[in-house]
Image (tube, rainbow, N blue to C red):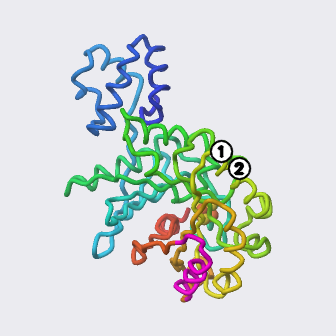
Amino acid sequence: MNCIFNYSLQALEDKLLSLNLKKYNAKQIFEWIYKKKIFDFKQMTNLAKNTREVLDKNFIFNLLTIVKVSSDKKKEAIKFLFKLYDGNYIETVVMQFNYGYSICISTQVGCNMGCKFCASGVNKKIRNLEPSEIVLQYLCAWQYLNKTKKINISNIVVMGIGEPFENYNNLIIALKTFINPFGLQIGQRHITVSTCGLVPKILHFAKDMPQVNLAISLHAANNNLRSSLMPINKVYNLNVLIETCKKYVKMTNRRLTFEYILLKNINDSQKDALALVKLLKPLLCYVNLIPYNETNLCNYSRSDKINNFFNILNKNRLLATIRLERGTKIDAACGQLRIKECQKKKF
Ligand code: SF4
């Protein structure tokens, strides 16, 4: 049976018509699920009894199982380890900021991109997440957190396990549900998708989701260093990537974000900062400097020059921020919790 969370509103309308139900039922169902968070057709009281019976026979609500929830002392970061219907694990983190709550979601089980500093890349990709599994990270985390305190998760970052653009079609279906007025109705500019640089998909994304923010994981400003940190650079090098980013900005008129994790003695020198300025200055963009979350799964250390690096960018008028840290004490670097669980279960 089909999991109801896999459907965009339009796809659900088409499916209902094929079942001889009314197209407008789709909006009613969406409101029950995404606004009222009711996951049972029997409780959808504005649907006719026979409609509910047909729905019950054709759709299931396949929720994620919460295996573990950990949080730091201040509860500024709450990390969920979810088990999927086939026994695989994924991670999701909810973070509290002064503007409200933000959720970091995964798009794949494991990742094939092999970035050397990333715990998620240690285990290869097992499979793509279905649209439902992307959307359900939000719904299940929301449901769990709202048992104790009424909160609203207003921002989404697609920066968890996996390369979102490697699971492009399912990502777009999930994004449609996130932004739909009858769905979760999250403002498009409150959603950020991060890619390590799958160049062809950057232009597709500019066409499909021009109002959703795009972030590029950069982490180095020269090809040799970037290729040694991120194998994707051997396929789409910096020259190709930056040219594509220029096209993206031209198509969308949106400011891009470049993420730059500062690794001690690897990419944190004055020379690196000046190379970054030279590379990005011509672009409508800003740089998000990220303190490294150390893990014993990767051989890198946190840089102690982050303020220095920031000041060089600032002095050279390259817009930059330093990412606020959340969850360093709870294995919040993406993939760490899942790997521990897989090691326990000898995956
Ligand atoms: S940083 Fe992102 S793209 Fe790179 S290995 Fe980790 S999850 Fe994959």
Residue 38 position, x and y percent, is 27, 36
Q: Quadrant of the C terminus?
A: bottom right
Callout 2, which amino acid? Lys
Residue 185 position, x and y percent, is 37, 40
Callout 1, which amino acid? Met
Residue range (magenta): 305-320
Above-or-below relation of 307 to 173: below
**Is residue 123 or residue 271 the one in the foreground?**
271
Ligand 1 appears in which quadrant? Answer: bottom right
Quarter of the image for residue 292 reads: bottom right
SS at mark 1 in the image: helix
Q: Is residue 162 left or right of residue 242?
A: left
**Is residue 301 or residue 262 the one in the foreground?**
262
**Is residue 263 or residue 63 the one in the foreground?**
263
Task: Give the total number of marks visible in the rendering.
Answer: 2
Magenta: main secondary structure: helix
Mark 2 and mark 1: span between their CA atoms? 6 Å
Q: Which mark is residue 121?
A: none
**Residue at position x 40%, y 78% from top?**
329
- Name the residue carrying label 1: 251
**Residue at position x 34%, y 24% from top?**
56
**Is residue 220 or residue 311 the one in the foreground?**
311
Asked whether the beta carbons under mark 2 and mark 1 sit within 8 Å of each other, the answer is: yes
- Name the residue carrying label 2: 247
- Is residue 319 part of the magenta span, yes or no? yes
Crowd around label 2: few <14 · some 14–19 · many ≥20 (10 Å)? some
